[in-house]
Amino acid sequence: MLNTSETANTSDVDVRDLMANIGKKARVAARVLATAPTSQKNTGLTAMAAAIRAATPEILSANAQDLDLMKANGQLDSFIDRGTLNEERVEAIACALEDIAKLDDPVGSSIAQWTRPNGLDISRIRTPLGVIGVIYESRPNVTADAGALCLKAGNAVILRGGSDTINSNVVIHKALQSGLAEAGLPVDVIQIVPIKDRAAVGEMLKGLNGNLDVIIPRGGRSLVARVQDEARVPVFAHLEGLVHIFVDKKADLDKAIDIVTNSKLRRTGVCGAAETLLVDEAVVATHLPPILAALQQKGCEIRGDEEVLMLCPTANAASEEDWATEYQDAIISVKIVSGLDEAIEHIGEYGSNHTDCIITEDQIAVRKFFAQVDSAIVLHNASTQFADGGEFGMGAEIGIATGRMHARGPVGVEQLTSFKYVVRGTGQTRP
């Protein structure tokens, strides 16, 4: 494998051969891991956490290189924030690995069991998917989260992180492999694509000669679109987080102010950050001015429709494009709607099926919102920044799947498994 200093000099690397070899090694490792006992996987995870802590100075040094390049390339502050590591965030990575070790092992667990009239005993049992490819942008913590979740679910994983944080990713990966070796597990269970060449992504999308079973993209619309268009293997779609909050006519004002500001501004670059605020016209006079004032006080730009501009002269006019934009920045689009029905209609037209929230004290409105908003995550009276596998008690996540097949919402260990049917008989034959 290339070391960190070599990642930028890959002109002499045959990408096709490199990726084919990575795929072969992953398949071999996956077969070993599929039968590894839970105790061995957990030992690996705790050893990985210890290795991450021990490598903190090296990780932060590599991350400083990445940040310098991102700043030199004029990246947005929110994008830089996603790629930034400090001692607290490195410790959070280590803690997430330990949390995943504490989760129940899904492999071999029974999803359902029944007995047929002829005496056949049938069980549906969780099994690993096999070899997973994860293609992601900027967030170096995904290197550890994805590697650990795939390990716990019995899968080998091939990680292709963004070029912006390749130095951080390589050092984190080195620590993960150290933990695997300490536990006696194949180090090829977690591999990283060590080059920036985008042709490597193309090889993954082709399936690595049948050695890749599923691909999980985590990034912007252009990345996900490419993966969905070109992939020859199944894809767990993770579309952009075009997140809405609807302030209903029966919303508590204090709750609304706290939830909206936290949803938008806690971290603007995460996929659960709110991008559009919808407000019932019945509470515009009482609720909208203080909400907008709280947002602006914290440095958020407001882009609103005509009615919003009348109430907030310092806001900017929203265009049609704004309703379909994931800003990932301290910007929010604001629209006044006639009520719950129009809010649901707006979300249906512009949303990305990721995460949407209603703020109200009306339980009938909540039930209607939950039933009619077709998003992977719907919330009532809670910040949209809770759209996270760790906050769901899943230890961590690879991403938020917005499709409707197999995995939906936070992709944790259970979502990284398939199943098979185990049928036990006593000599039955079919007439």
Image (cartoon, rainbow, N blue to C red):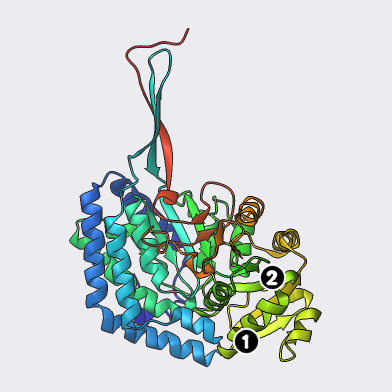
Give the residue at mark 1.
Answer: 293
| Relative depth, front residue between 242 and 180 | 242
Q: Are marks 1 and 2 in contact (CB under 8 Å)?
A: no
Quarter of the image for residue 102 reads bottom left
Q: Residue furthest right?
A: 306
- Left or right of 136 in this view: 63: left
**Marks 1, 2: nearer the viewer:** 1
Residue in the image at 74% along x and 80% along y: 304
Image x and y of residue 383, in percent: 52, 69
Question: Callout 1: helix, strand or loop?
Answer: helix
Q: Is residue 247 left or right of residue 162?
A: right
* Vertical placement of residue 260 versus 109, above or below: below
Label 1 crowding class (10 Å Cα cut-off): few <14, some 14-19, many 20+?
some
For the residue pair 220 and 333, the one nearer the viewer reads as 333
Which is more N-terminal, label 2 or label 1?
A: 2
Q: For the N terminus, give its image quadrant.
A: bottom left
Q: Where residue 67 appears, x then y in whole percent?
A: 44, 87
The image shows residue 65, relative to residue 15, as above or below, that is: below
Name the residue: 45% across, 11% down.
Answer: 430
Residue shown at the point (43%, 61%) measured from the top left = 389
The amino acid type found where label 2 is placed reads Leu
Q: Residue drawn 65% across and 69% down?
A: 247
What percent of the width, then of the height, locates residue 340?
71, 60
- The numbered disc on residue 188 is none
Q: Residues within 10 Å of mark 2 (few under 14, many from 20)?
A: many
Which residue lies under the disc numbered 2? 278
